Amino acid sequence: MSSIEKLQPASKADTLMYQPYYGKEEHDILPHALSLYQQGYLEGERIIEGKTNIPFVAIWYVSRLPTEKTRCRIQFDGNADLSYEINLSNQDFVKYLILLIKDFKKFRKTDFSQQFYRKLLRVDEDEEKNNSA
């Protein structure tokens, strides 16, 4: 059984603090996403179509408030050269965890969304710089 399946929902007080940041359709997953966030740690696999999945470990700083910043560090395949960091608000990071749990329920795989990886690798920022140059 995956650690995602074993998640106990976060407290009602914590959940209520974050609810205004998400649509009603996300409120049922929010307590579990907050519980995952509060662990500060996740192991999963980056799913690569037609290739071998790449294991990763993600760790992040945990704080209580939705507007505070979280620094998340991901290391792929146990290789320090394949480490990436991202800083974003807790509410944005929890949104990515909501998507991760939704995808897990559908595909039974623990992986972040394409949007998260675009942000992590700063793909959109690079495209904006190229378009404005």
Image (cartoon, rainbow, N blue to C red):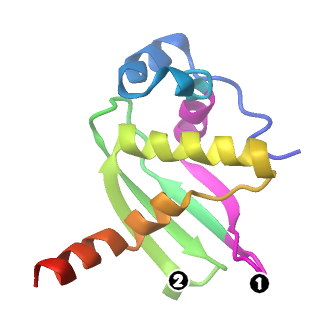
In the figure, residue 89 lies in which quadrant? Answer: top left
Residue farthest toward the left in the current orientation of the protein: 133
Label 2, residues with CA under 10 Å away: few <14, some 14-19, many ≥20: few
Quarter of the rendering containing residue 125: bottom left
Q: Label 1 to label 2, Cα distance in Å?
A: 18 Å
* Magenta segment includes 53: yes
Task: Residue at 50% x, 47% y: name it.
Answer: 96
Under circle 2, the secondary element is helix
**What x and y, as percent, mark residue 30?**
55, 27
Q: Outermost residue, front direction?
A: 131
Label located before the other in sequence (1 or 2) = 1
Q: Where is residue 92 in the image (x, y as percent from the top left)?
A: 38, 43
Q: What stretch is highlighted in magenta?
A: 32-55
| Direction from residue 33 to residue 83 in the image, left or right | left
Which marked residue is nearer to the observer: mark 1 or mark 2? 1
Residue 46 among those drawn in magenta? yes
Label number found at residue 51: 1
Secondary structure found at label 1: loop
Residue at image position (65%, 79%) is: 78
Does 7 sit left or right of 63 as displayed?
right
Pointer 1 with pointer 2, Cβ within 8 A: no
Q: Which residue lies furthest to the right in this view?
A: 1
Residue type at mark 1: give it. Answer: Lys
- Determine the residue positioned at 78% across, 82% down: 50
Disc 2 target residue: 82
Q: Quadrant of the N terminus?
A: top right
Is residue 122 visible in the rendered structure shown here? Answer: no
The relative height of residue 87 versus residue 128 in the rendered view (above or below) is: above
Q: Position of residue 104 (x, y in %)?
A: 73, 47
Badge 2 amino acid: Leu
